[in-house]
Each structure stands twice: as structure tokens, then as C-alpha cells.
């Protein structure tokens, strides 16, 4: 990952945590019912998730009580606008933006000397069956401050009121109680610590629950797509919910998404785009073995690309150039079938979210499509960074250089 880190492409916007902030973070973990970290320094993202703490606990979802009860932590106003690097839901970043937009000023004040624990509550204590995921609808976002600061504020105000009553101003014990409270928690008299609960409504989304599920319910018929085969097999036994259920590897899914005007594919247009160029070169890279030139140079040079294209076997060549061959033959006759000439995953990779979709839906469908056919390295980085990082580890070093250059040229 060193090259990615040097190029600022690997979790580059994490916020460093050390000193007093570690103590506050641990208090949040304890308040939320989790074990504390032994780390003296680490980093967090916009949701308060830390890759170092996750590694220490050997649990990437250490801020969850089961799949139905996620949480977040705010210990710094710097978390505003920061990425959520391992979202449990596709809408996690939107929820954090909603929180900071509504309570931003109070968060700035509270995090001067305290921290905020976040509960994301969708009125589901635990999931029992895969289609329980359809219960996600309205999420209540509530907040708790460490050290019960709201209660300490009430106590402090009560002490001040008592001090002002009658002759209590001469009560030395009362003086000491007020001083102790101020020393421990600061002057809370004029602080606005009331973070009222917020509501967030979901529509279509992705969740890591049940090993990965897409819920598309803003279209003709609700569609649920499972990434895990065993969970999918369990889900299709359901006879109660009126939804279409697919496994992500089913070819029929692409056709259904097209029928529901969720995705589209204009091959004549796509071959003119940078997307196609990236996908074709990705396909080509899989056939480059023991090359005389670095893979990056082969993919970047038209002459080298053509040279190596002619060196690979004819079947591999057809897979790389199938789309162009198909369109070329289609100009002469409409008897050719796309499935006979274009490799299926290559064809799937060239689909796009339908132009009628909102930006929010487009991002979700981009993520679904890149999970179906992960051949566009730029979109894989944009829409599924964790899968990108896993794939990156398996790639040739020179191919990594090409990928990094592609991403840096497009951000």
C-alpha cells in the first residue's frame, strides 16, 4: 500500500487522535457498551471509525452491536465533511452530513472538552431473516455526551440556584461543590448541550448486513440483491414480501435492471468514452505474462498495446477487442448476437446507471455495477474502496503504477 499512501490514495483524510482525545474516545466506546482501546494514538474518519482500532480488535465493525445497531463517535469538529471509509450503509456519509449541518455549531462547542456518542436507531433490535433488511425506513439519530455532561450541567445549575437562595452564599461546603464541578467539567452554565434527536429517511441503499445487500425500492418493483450465495438461498424461501430477489452473479439481474429503467448500455457511445478505454486495458492486462516491457508502458502506448495484442492468443484477443469487433460486424449485418461476440463480464462492465436517475441513485447503481463486473479501476476506487484495496494487493507492481496514474489524473 506504500505507493497508494505516497499518492494520497489510501485513507489520506483520516484525523490523527492522541493525548486527551484518546481518553475521550475511550469514554465514548465505554458509553456505547464497547471495550476500550489500548492504543495511545490512532486515526479516525468522519464517522469516528478507526482502522487501527479495528485492527487491534480484529473487528472492522467494532462500532456495531450486531448488524442492526450501528453507532458513531464525534470527538472533533474536524470530522465534518470527512470521508466515511468503511460505511456499514451507503447512506452513512449522508447521515453524518445531516448531523453536522443541523448541530454543527453545538458540536464545535461540545467537542472543546467533551465527545459525542451517536446511536443510529431504526427500531430493529436484531435481524433474524435476510428480508428483515426491508424494515430499514426511518432512522432516528440520537446523541449521548460522555461523563453524562448534560446531567452535570443540570447539577451545576442547581448548585448555582441554591447558592443564590437566602444566605447560602456563605455556605463553604456549597462553595466547594461548585468549585469541584467547575474544575471537573468547566463552567457549564451558558453551554448549549442539547442535541435533539434527528430523523433520516432511507430509500434505496446498500448495507453490509447479511454479508452485503442492495435494496432498490424506488423503482417499478422493489429489488433486493444479495452478495452472499447462502444468504440469497435463504432469502428466496420467503413467501411474505412482494419483492424481486437476485444474487449478484445472476446474469438475469442485468436484464431486470434494464427492464426497470435502472441501467442502460449504448455500446456505440461507450466505445468512445474513457470508461471503455480503462475496461479494455484492464481486460488486456489479465493476458500479459512475462512481458519485455512494464505493463504500465504497454497500456499507455498505442504501439506497444497493438504489439502485445498481436502476441496473445486469438481467443484472448477476441475477449479484449470483442466490443469493437461486434460493432464493426453489426454495420454490415444485424444477424450477429452480442452474447456470441462480447465476453459477458466485459458487456456488463459497460453498463451505466440510467440517465434519468438522481445523483444519489446513480452513485448506488455505480457501486452495484462495479460489484457485478469490477473491471473499471477508477470506478472501483470511487465506489468500493475496500474492494479496490483488496484487488490492489493482487496486482502486478507495474499495473499498480498504471492504476495510480489513472486515478490521479481523474481526481
Image (cartoon, rainbow, N blue to C red):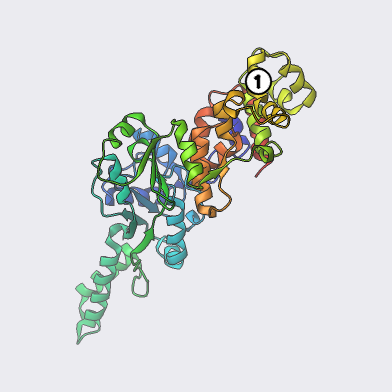
- Residue 338 in sight from this viewpoint: yes
Residue 363, horizontal then vertical, whole percent: 52, 47
Q: Nearer the viewer, residue 286 or 295?
A: 286
> Is residue 108 positioned above or below 353 on the image?
below
Counting the numbered discs, the total is 1
Residue 307, horizontal then vertical, whole percent: 76, 17
The residue that appears at 71% across and 38% down in the rendered structure is: 272
Residue 173, horizontal then vertical, whole percent: 20, 72
The residue that appears at 27% across and 52% down in the rendered structure is: 31
Quarter of the figure with the N terminus = top right
| Mark 1: secondary structure | helix
Q: Nearer the viewer, residue 347 or 163?
A: 347
Q: Nearer the viewer, residue 310 or 13?
A: 310
> Is residue 188 positioned above or below 393 on the image?
below
Residue 216, horizontal then vertical, whole percent: 42, 47
Residue 144 picture quarter = bottom left
> Is residue 96 positioned above or below 186 on the image?
above
The residue that appears at 61% across and 31% down in the rendered structure is: 3
Which residue is denoted by mark 1 in the rendering? Answer: 318
Q: Is residue 404 left or right of residue 255?
A: right
- Residue 76 in sight from this viewpoint: no
- Residue neighbourhood size for the residue with mark 1, other residues' Cα within 10 Å, grouped as few (<14), some (14–19), many (≥20): some
Q: Is residue 25 left or right of residue 301?
A: left
Quarter of the figure with the C terminus = top right
> Is residue 167 positioned above or below 348 on the image?
below
Residue 146 picture quarter = bottom left
Q: Is residue 33 left or right of residue 355?
A: left
Q: Is residue 226 left or right of residue 317?
A: left
Q: Looking at this rendering, what residue extends furthest in the right direction?
A: 303
Amino acid at each position: 500500500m506504500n505507493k497508494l499512501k505516497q499518492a494520497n490514495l489510501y485513507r489520506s483524510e483520516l484525523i490523527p487522535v492522541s493525548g486527551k482525545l484518546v481518553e475521550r474516545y475511550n469514554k465514548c466506546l465505554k458509553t456505547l457498551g464497547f471495550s476500550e482501546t489500548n492504543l495511545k494514538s490512532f486515526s479516525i474518519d468522519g464517522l469516528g471509525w478507526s482502522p487501527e482500532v479495528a485492527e487491534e480488535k480484529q473487528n472492522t465493525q467494532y462500532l456495531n452491536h450486531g448488524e442492526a445497531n450501528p453507532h458513531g463517535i464525534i470527538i472533533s469538529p474536524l470530522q465534518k465533511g470527512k470521508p466515511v471509509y468503511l460505511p456499514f450503509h451507503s447512506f452513512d456519509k449522508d447521515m453524518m452530513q445531516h448531523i453536522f449541518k443541523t448541530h454543527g455549531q453545538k458540536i464545535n462547542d461540545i467537542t472543546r472538552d467533551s465527545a459525542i456518542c451517536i446511536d443510529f436507531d431504526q427500531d430493529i433490535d436484531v435481524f433474524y431473516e435476510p428480508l428483515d433488511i426491508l424494515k430499514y425506513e426511518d432512522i432516528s439519530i440520537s446523541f449521548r455526551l460522555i461523563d453524562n455532561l448534560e446531567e452535570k450541567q443540570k447539577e451545576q445549575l442547581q448548585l448555582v440556584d441554591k447558592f443564590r437562595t437566602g444566605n447560602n452564599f456563605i455556605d463553604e461546603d456549597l462553595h466547594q461543590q461548585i468549585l469541584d464541578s467547575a474544575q471537573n467539567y468547566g463552567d457549564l452554565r451558558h453551554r448549549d448541550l442539547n442535541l435533539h434527536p434527528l430523523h433520516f429517511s432511507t430509500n434505496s441503499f446498500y448495507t453490509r448486513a447479511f454479508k452485503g445487500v442492495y435494496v432498490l425500492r424506488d423503482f417499478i418493483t422493489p429489488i433486493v440483491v444479495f452478495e452472499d450465495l447462502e444468504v440469497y438461498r435463504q432469502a428466496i424461501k420467503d413467501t411474505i414480501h412482494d419483492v424481486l430477489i437476485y444474487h449478484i452473479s445472476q446474469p438475469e439481474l442485468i436484464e431486470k435492471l434494464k427492464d426497470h429503467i435502472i441501467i442502460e448500455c449504448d455500446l456505440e457511445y461507450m466505445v468512445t468514452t474513457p470508461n471503455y478505454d480503462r475496461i479494455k486495458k484492464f481486460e488486456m492486462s489479465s493476458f500479459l505474462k512475462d512481458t519485455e516491457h512494464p505493463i504500465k508502458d504497454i497500456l499507455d502506448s498505442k504501439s506497444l498495446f497493438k504489439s502485445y495484442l498481436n502476441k496473445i492468443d486469438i481467443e484472448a484477443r477476441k475477449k479484449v477487442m470483442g466490443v469493437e469487433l461486434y460493432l464493426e460486424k453489426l454495420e454490415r449485418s444485424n444477424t450477429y448476437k452480442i452474447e456470441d461476440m462480447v465476453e459477458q463480464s466485459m458487456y456488463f462492465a459497460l453498463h451505466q446507471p440510467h440517465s434519468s436517475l438522481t445523483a444519489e441513485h446513480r452513485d448506488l447503481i455505480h457501486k452495484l455495477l462495479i460489484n457485478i463486473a469490477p473491471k473499471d479501476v477508477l470506478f472501483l476506487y470511487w465506489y468500493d474502496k475496500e474492494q479496490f484495496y483488496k484487488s490492489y494487493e493482487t496486482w502486478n507492481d507495474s499495473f499498480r503504477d498504471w492504476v495510480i496514474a489513472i486515478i490521479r489524473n481523474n481526481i
